[in-house]
């Protein structure tokens, strides 16, 4: 693909997200989401591989369904209330339909079935964009309408996402599917806290994007997408493999890494809201995710003496991956926990 075409598509991604960020009308927000979807489709299919074509088709059909549902919900709301304002979502049917449409766009359980299959068919860089940037526009609409959304629905979506995200990743051998289920689980934490503390929801999303970007860039540096190839990397690039291991543990929320911060604060907030049972279930569901992260970390260290590995050694090719973004994101992923009081003071 021409660099000029790539630049135009990436600019369109930014434009669509910005339109959704700044819109006060449902029609403009919907247009921003559509620009976002249409801009990423050529990036997804540029490999001309059957798996990429299949993933792009699944993504397009899913996003088209979500966009149609969202447009119908906003039209129904405008018909019932006479308002196109994104802050005025008072009709109950429109509220539920909007919640389902945005959950489908983000890949929140139980509307998550498309995300692992789509992510598996994409290269790591496009998968990174899909797992991070594409979540921003739907999250913005959830953020703006959270005061109108049904609390029970949001709790069910959040708890279901964390449980399914943990269970789904247990038996995976493909790293992109593991990261897809990780995304589903983390979005569950965002969904469940957004009505009680928008600050914590935003903090959780930003830290999720940081940690996921670190994991994807590390895997791109290691040129690996499967567990059995990941197990061969320790003897070749021990430092990078160690960073990948720590990034995965941070995604699992293991202290003293950065991923522990949002989970700790969210559980504290749920307890303050007199929801100890929900907080307990959320904490237990995290153990499922932590198990498959620990499984990956165990696989990475199999090649340390005296253990042996029966996989065929692959060629070690020179990577053209830039080291600076990975280094900066790794620092934020591993060392941001002590800055928790400062972050909370800034965001409050």
Image (cartoon, rainbow, N blue to C red):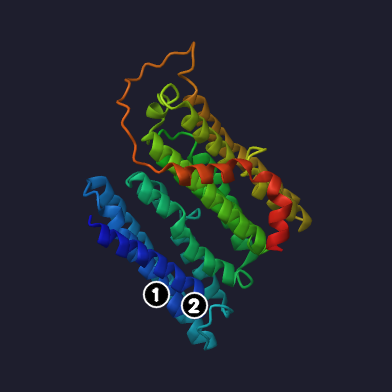
Q: How many labels does the image show?
A: 2
Residue positioned 61% across, 69% down in the render: 146
Q: Residue furthest bottom?
A: 82
Q: Which of 316 and 155 is in front in this view?
A: 316
Quadrant of the image occupied by residue 6 = bottom left
Horizontal and vertical percent position of residue 341: 74, 52
Q: Residues within 10 Å of mark 1 (few under 14, many from 20)?
A: some
Q: Which residue was labeled with disc 1?
A: 31
> What kind of element bears circle 1?
helix
Q: Which residue was labeled with disc 2?
A: 23
Residue positioned 35% across, 20% down in the render: 311
Horizontal and vertical percent position of residue 330: 54, 42
> What kind of element bears circle 2?
loop
User: In the picture, which quadrant includes the N terminus?
Assistant: bottom left
**Which dot marks residue 44?**
none
Horizontal and vertical percent position of residue 76: 47, 80
């Amino acid at each position: 693909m021409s660099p000029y075409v790539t630049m135009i598509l990436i600019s369109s991604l930014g434009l669509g997200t910005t339109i959704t960020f700044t819109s006060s009308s449902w029609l403009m927000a919907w247009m921003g989401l559509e620009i976002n979807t249409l801009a990423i489709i050529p990036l997804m299919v540029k490999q001309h591989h059957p798996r990429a074509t299949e993933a792009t088709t699944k993504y397009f059909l899913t996003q088209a369904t979500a966009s149609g549902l969202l447009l119908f919900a906003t039209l129904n709301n405008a018909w019932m209330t006479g308002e196109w304002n994104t802050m005025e979502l008072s009709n109950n049917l429109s509220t539920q339909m909007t919640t389902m449409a945005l959950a489908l766009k983000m890949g929140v359980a139980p509307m998550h079935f498309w995300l692992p299959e789509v992510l598996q068919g994409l290269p790591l860089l496009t998968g990174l964009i899909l797992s991070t940037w594409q979540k921003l526009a739907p999250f913005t609409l959830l953020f703006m309408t959270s005061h109108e959304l049904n609390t029970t629905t949001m709790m069910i979506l959040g708890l279901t996402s964390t449980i399914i995200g943990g269970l789904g990743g247990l038996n995976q051998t493909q790293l992109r599917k593991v990261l897809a289920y990780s995304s589903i689980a983390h979005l569950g934490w965002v969904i469940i806290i957004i009505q009680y503390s928008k600050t914590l929801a935003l903090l959780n999303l930003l830290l999720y994007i940081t940690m996921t970007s670190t994991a994807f860039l590390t895997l791109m540096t290691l040129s690996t997408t499967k567990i059995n190839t990941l197990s061969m990397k320790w003897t070749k690039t021990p430092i990078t493999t160690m960073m990948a291991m720590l990034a995965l543990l941070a995604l699992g929320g293991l202290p003293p890494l950065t991923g522990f911060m949002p989970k700790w604060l969210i559980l504290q907030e749920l307890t303050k809201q007199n929801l100890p049972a929900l907080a307990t279930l959320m904490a237990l569901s995290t153990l499922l995710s932590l198990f498959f992260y620990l499984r990956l970390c165990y696989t990475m260290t199999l090649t340390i003496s005296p253990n042996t590995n029966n996989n065929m050694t692959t060629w070690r090719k020179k990577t053209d991956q830039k080291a600076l973004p990975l280094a900066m994101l790794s620092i934020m992923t591993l060392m941001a926990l002590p800055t928790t009081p400062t972050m909370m003071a800034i965001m409050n």
